[in-house]
Image: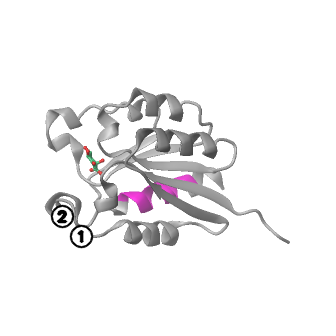
Amino acid sequence: MERDVKTILVLNGPNLNLLGQRQPEIYGHENLDDVKALAQAACAEGFSIEQKQSNWEGQLIDWIHEARGTTAGIVINPGALTHTSVALLDALNTYEGPVIEVHISQVHKREPFRHHSYVSKRADAVIAGLGVDGYGAAIRRICKLQS
Ligand code: DQA
């Protein structure tokens, strides 16, 4: 019997294209290709990953809109937009499935401006400080919720 594969969207915001090169003492040495491989490995049977990155707020918003009704969940690391973007929050509020917010670093022990997240007002879970393993944990949780 053929089964539909459910897609989980992994979204990365500004500056995360430089993951692995950018402040490795904070964000580590793994890059977005490593994140994709790790996310795919964390997927349960019947799920697949679609990973996207943009430095542009509007592009991330368009991708969230496109995910409506077509995906099993969103894992999002909004980068600095976490702390500034009501528009990203509004977009996520149009999405019906589970949303998990991931931060590679432990934002709560960093500068005070990183302690507030607009996205957390919508996220069903927030992971911070697990390094890139946070993406795997988020994928496993969405697979569990949507199985
Ligand atoms: C980040 C934390 C944000 O404060 C920062 O602006 C980022 C990355 C993280 O993954 O730890 O770009 O979201």
Is residue 33 positioned above or below 134 on the image?
below
The reply to whether discs 2 and 1 touch (Cβ–Cβ < 8 Å) is yes
Is residue 126 found inside the magenta-colored segment of the image?
A: no
Q: What segment is highlighted magenta in the picture? A: 134-142
Q: Quadrant of residue 28?
A: bottom left
Q: Residues within 10 Å of mark 1 (few under 14, many from 20)?
A: some
Q: Seen in the image, is 40 located left or right of residue 85?
A: right
Residue type at mark 1 is His
Residue type at mark 2 is Pro
Judging from the image, what secondary structure is the residue with disc 2 in?
A: helix
Q: Nearer the viewer, residue 34 or 139?
A: 34
Identify the mark at residue 29; answer none if there is no mark.
Answer: 1
Is residue 141 found inside the magenta-colored segment of the image?
A: yes
The structure residue drawn at horizontal position 28% and vertical position 61%, both measured from the top left corner, is: 18
Q: Seen in the image, is 38 located left or right of residue 81?
A: right
Q: Nearer the viewer, residue 76 or 65?
A: 65
The majority secondary structure of the magenta stretch comes to helix
Quadrant the C terminus occupies: bottom right
Q: Quadrant of residue 126?
A: top left
The structure residue drawn at horizontal position 40% and vertical position 27%, both measured from the top left corner, is: 86
The structure residue drawn at horizontal position 61% and vertical position 46%, both measured from the top left corner, is: 67
Judging from the image, what secondary structure is the residue with disc 1 in?
A: loop
Residue 141, given in percent of the width and then of the height, sits at: 51, 54
Residue 70, given in percent of the width and then of the height, sits at: 68, 48
Identify the mark at residue 24; answer none if there is no mark.
Answer: 2
Residue 41, given in percent of the width and then of the height, sits at: 50, 72
Quadrant the N terminus occupies: bottom right
Q: Nearer the viewer, residue 88 or 136?
A: 88
